[in-house]
Amino acid sequence: MAIINPTINLVARPGMSLPKPWVLIRDGSDLTSTQLAKVPSGANDLEKKAYASKGTYITATTTLGIETGANKLRHDYSSKKDSEYAGTYNGFLVEAFSENLLMTQTTPIPCRDLTTWTKSPSDAVVVVLRAGITAAGDSDGNNPASKLMAGSSTSASVSKSITGLKANTTYTLSAYFKKVDKSSVAIPKIALSSSGASSITTWGTSRTVSDPYNWILLTYKFTTPASVTSATSYHIGIKASDAPVLVDRVQLEEGNNTSTILETSKVRAAENLYYVGDSDTARLIDPFEGTVYVMCKVQENVENIPGLKVGICQLGNDTGVRIGIRAESTSSSDWKIYGTLINVLNIADAAADEAASAVFSIANADWPEDDWLKIAVRYRAGESNTIRMSVNGKQVVYGDLAAGSALKNTFELNGITRPAGSSNEVTAPIRLGKVYASSSPKTYHFLDGSIMHFAYFPKALSDEDLVAITA
């Protein structure tokens, strides 16, 4: 491989701050990092651990740390203690928009004190003070949790009705469970009933939990649109069998499960890393050829949710020509990675997107064991196979612009023209974790994962080099 240095290079390291001109952007101003209690995330964590300590991000020792002030980075670590990846640094955490639908009901549903939920038996739950997960900024430690009073030969359950759910939509129900004492073992279950019955009769996943808190989730997709209306009342439920169990921080979210506990704010703002565009940084990006490299992890529980759209990287604004990298899980939960360079990046139109992209497919069973995606996309005007891409050291795949496209032989990236220094060379923004989807309404796809490395090379690397840098 010839030595070609990147003109833009961002490599994550534990504890570092973003170098200029990179900034962390949170859409909206309602959230600051001190309002979020971060849950450990990382490689293959089927059960996330939430530790009784203040904070908004995970340290190298997998305990909760705290950042003060808005829009500061949080660093992500794998936390599963019995995993070979335990404590592994995952880079910069970049999360997507989410809301706890329990808290945004017309009458908010309590997420910690479950005594107002429908109970079976009637004394199935009590509140235990100072037993829950400590909130960020909580100084008095009065963090309650609910205890389901299951005995050795009985079970206890609670349920609650909820409205506002949509057809053909995936939801994630999650809660945190902890055994009550050192000798007890709890087998909790969580469920979302689509029947509208007054009680939960079919339960979802179950898990043996221990200490500290274990995160258990259930994803559920409504697949019969005619039977699902926003006015229909469905039921969510939690059940504990064989022993008492503590329950804390119940959440119901649309789409993929998230990694942050949504506190009293109810809603989490979407995040992205943004490289500010100006006349100086514009010179670093060549509109006619270049190579983009990114190393990232996408959302938690990726294998379980079909139809998930993930925005990884975008060079350029939301108009004109831009480069986009995104991932999408298919209806069979397999994955496709798209490297795209088109005039209108309308990701809502999957057929048009794929036709103008280099597309790499990953069978769900072949998803990388450590969850890392290393993607390199190169572009060059005036040649066949304008777009070329390698993912995780695999053979290069190709995409091309339409033969009649005005961009086939020459194109501009966000109005940047050559030679350098021209009057139009005014902007070269880069977004990591946020990719433009469509204009009507204007929407984006987000990463909700972590970024370890981003680099931009001002040359179109060879196929061999694309394979080498992603291997």
Image (cartoon, rainbow, N blue to C red):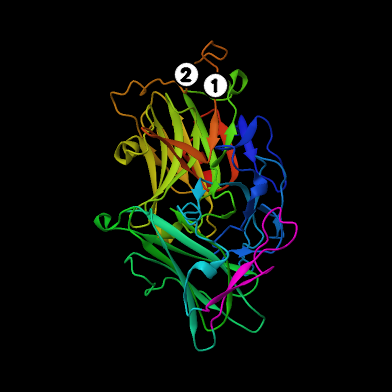
Q: Is residue 301 visible?
A: yes
Q: Residues within 10 Å of mark 1 (few under 14, many from 20)?
A: many
For marks 1 and 2, give the CA distance: 8 Å
* Helix, strand or loop status at disc 1: loop
Q: Toward which corner of the image does residue 176 lie, by quadrant?
A: bottom right
Compare residues 407 and 309 and report the one nearer the observer. 309
Disc 2 is placed on an element classified as loop
Q: Is residue 238 above or below residue 330?
A: below
Q: Which residue is mark 1?
A: 427
Q: Estimate the x, y position of residue 106 in percent, counting from the top left.
A: 45, 52
Whether residue 383 is in magenta: the answer is no
- CB within 8 Å, label 1 to label 2: yes
Magenta stretch: give its range. Answer: 123-150
**Residue 469 position in % (x across, y down):** 55, 43
Amino acid type indicated by mark 1: Thr
Q: Residue lying furthest bottom in this view?
A: 153
Q: Is residue 291 above or below residue 335?
A: above
Q: Amino acid at mark 2?
A: Gly
Q: Please, which residue is most extreme toward the top here?
A: 423
Of the numbered discs 1 and 2, the one sitting upstream in the chain is 2
Q: Position of residue 366 (x, y in %)?
A: 43, 59
Mark 2 Cα shell of 10 Å, populated few (<14), some (14-19), many (≥20): some
Which residue is tagged 2? 415
Of 121 and 258, nearer the camera is: 121
x and y, in percent, of residue 256 in the image: 46, 54
Q: Is 456 displayed left or right of 322 in the figure?
A: right
